[in-house]
Amino acid sequence: MANPPTLAHGMAHRFVVSAGSRDLGAWSKVAGLSVKWDLAEYRVGHSDQYFKFAGVPKFATLKLSRAADTTGTKAVQTWLGEVQASGGTPEEGAVEMLTSAGDSVIVWTLREMFPIAWQISEFDATTGKVAMETLEIVYSGFLLAAQQAGA
C-alpha cells in the first residue's frame, strides 16, 4: 500500500510580513486578512425580474501582533519613520504563512498597503509579561500566490 501524501498544514502561529522590499519580521497573530463583497442587485425595467451579483469588495484592516524583539520591532519603527517622511504613500506588501518547519504554505500579496496604527503594550516590570507590539495596516486587496504566477 502506498504512503498517503504529506500535507503542509498552515500553522496559525507563523507569519512573515513584508512592506515593499522591507522585511517586517515574523508575527504570531494576523487578523483581518479577509474580503467581503457588497450585494448588488439590478432590476430589469419595471418587471419583477432582477439579478444579484457581487458589488464592490471591502477589505478589513489587517492587525498584526507579536512579542517585541530587537530586529523586527526596529524594522517596523524604521518603516513607520519612512512612511511618515513620504506622507504615507501606499506600496505593495505580503503576508506569508509558514509551517512549523519554516516552509511556505501560501503568500498573500497586499496591494496599496500602509500603516495606520502601531502600539506596544504597557510596560510593567513587576508583572513579568512579554511586551507585545501591534501594527495595523490598511490595504486595497490581495492576490493569491498562484494568481501571480499565472497558474
Image (cartoon, rainbow, N blue to C red):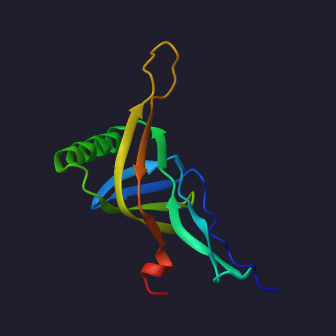
Where does the N terminus fall, quadrant-wise?
bottom right
Q: Nearer the viewer, residue 127 or 49?
A: 49
Q: Residue furthest right?
A: 1
Question: What is the quadrant of residue 36 in the picture?
Answer: bottom right
* Residue 63 position in % (x across, y down): 48, 46
* Residue 122 position in % (x across, y down): 44, 22
- Total labels drawn: 0
- Residue at 22% across, 44% down: 84
* Residue 66 position in % (x across, y down): 47, 41
Q: Is residue 58 visible?
A: yes
Question: Would residue 122 be found to the left or right of residue 31 on screen?
Answer: left
- Residue at 22% across, 42% down: 81
Q: Nearer the viewer, residue 135 or 111?
A: 111
Question: Would residue 128 be found to the left or right of residue 49 on screen?
Answer: left
Measured along the vertical axis of the image, is residue 125 above or below residue 150?
A: above
Q: Residue furthest top?
A: 126
Q: Residue furthest left?
A: 85
Q: Residue furthest front?
A: 46
- Residue at 47% across, 75% down: 145
Q: Is residue 103 visible?
A: no
Q: Nearer the viewer, residue 142 or 150?
A: 142
- Residue at 25% across, 50% down: 88
* Residue 44 position in % (x across, y down): 64, 83
